[in-house]
Amino acid sequence: MIRSITQIKPLEEIERLLEGLGRVFIIGCGTCATLTQTGGSPEVEAMKGQLSEKGKVITGVTVVPVACDHLTGQILNDIATPLKQADALLVMSCAFGVQTIAHQMGKTVIPALNTLFIGRETGAGEFNESCNQCGTCVIGETGGICPVTACHKGLVNGPCGGTNNGKCEIDSDKDCAWTAIYNRLTQLGRLDSMRRYQKPRNHLGEPSPGKFRIPV
Amino acid sequence: MPSAFKKALDSGKFIVTCEAAPSKGTNLEKMKHHIELLKDKVDAMNVTDHQSSVMRYPSLGGAILVKELGGEPILQMTCRDRNRMALQADLLFASSRGVNNVLCLTGDSVMLGDHKQAKPVFDLDSSQLVAAVRTMEKGRDMAGNELDGGVRFCAGAIVTPEANPIEPQLIKFEKKLEAGAEFIQTQAVYDMENFKKFMEYARQFPVKILAGIILLTSAPMARFMNKNVAGVRVPEELIDEMASAPKGGALNKGIEIAGRMVRQIKEEKICDGVHIMAIGKEEKVVDIMQAAGLL
């Protein structure tokens, strides 16, 4: 299942964003942010403690099931009073949830997390980015591994000179996409597709901001 | 008209290239000094493009300087900082100023340099940049529009013979040749037996290959490269040899080793020439060439 992978912002940044906003209502998310341990119940409680220590009045906390869902607005409206008392809503979900709540609630919304990438859980507590929604999918020729995402430089014609023992030049903990693609294509007997020269990419698969309507 | 470097490549002589590293700032005296010292001794001088992703005076400015001082520049261009429009524009600029050799590189990650939060570009890769040069030589830009006044370049690329695993690297190497690379400057090689094996493979292609020689300055520097520089492997015997140098004599030992490797490559005709990188010690290129019996 795809997951929105987040990281808690440094407390100093959250404090700066909350400057002049004394009363805060904290909202966590029961889906991705709970899985990544960045916006589940324990993290919401910890944030409550930290901000109380810094002198903030926490008017209430909640963890909504799916922050990015349309139903979030209704759920939050049910706890109207503590929410209305707050100067700001501190949202511990990914940016999809933050934007959903900002749109639905008409209140000042402060994100407590940074959204790192859309990824998959590939092991216990480990998440990897596997698609960055470029709009021009190339993985039919790369053994189902995306070089646009999995290669730090998004190279489509093979590895750079920084590849080292199957790892990336920026981090020995990150795999070299092209070593993985080479190995996969070798297994599949399809190395010829790696030998094919790929033209420069079309970077406008869907011009940003993306918008899609089901054709009628 | 082919560039002087292209003529040298085609002449069949043993080629020597070196580097001229642009400065951090506008004081170009050191670079000028290196250019003056080396321009008549080597066949061409590579001008590096924000080497190791450290922001510097631009490679194109440096290449024009080499030209103005009477040298033969090889413009290094990475795909890290410019999209295809900016790269093509700089190729036009280079051509208009008589800079007619280009080395096409992917470029290091910005994260390895001094502007770690900069936006990386990588709109093209190195093989696509070589192809872009060839497209422009036919009088059109990458979008197919006609150019008013064309370009002509001797275009090259790099390969890492010590890469592990080597096979994906060789596939990329072949793509660069198919795209039109005329010469290859390799990442540093120290293990001549391994390099000979690479050359046995590479000889099947009609391309000139210049072996990368990085001057060793001390045993710890060699160990540092082994640990931190992808695709560079200094064998233990060479590290021991560096360590055996008398106190204060490590640099001379490094010059001796580099000279010995250059001499071996030339005498055994292992490849077509050498690209000497004396990172920060460019004046020592003269000593290396002397040690190799080239001067």
Image (cartoon, coloured by chain):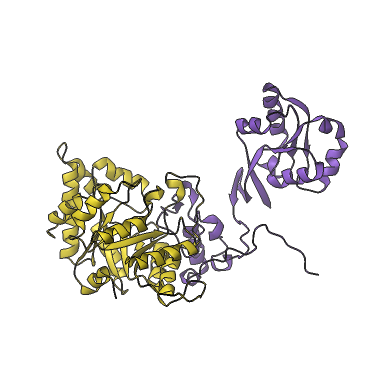
x, y percentage for residue B123? 50, 61
**Residue at the image point whose x is 86% and y is 34% from the top:** A80
Q: Which chain is yellow?
A: B
Quadrant of res B295: bottom left
x, y percentage for residue A182? 47, 63
Q: Nearer the viewer, residue A16 or A162?
A: A16
x, y percentage for residue B285? 20, 53
Q: Which chain is purple?
A: A
Q: Quadrant of the N terminus of chain B?
A: bottom left
**Residue at the image point whose x is 35% and y is 56% from the top:** B61
A10 w.r.t. B193: above or below: above
Q: How many marks?
A: 0
Q: Is residue B197 left or right of residue A99?
A: left
Quadrant of res A78: top right
x, y percentage for residue A90? 72, 35
Quadrant of res B76: bottom left
**Residue at the image point whose x is 14% and y is 57% from the top:** B292
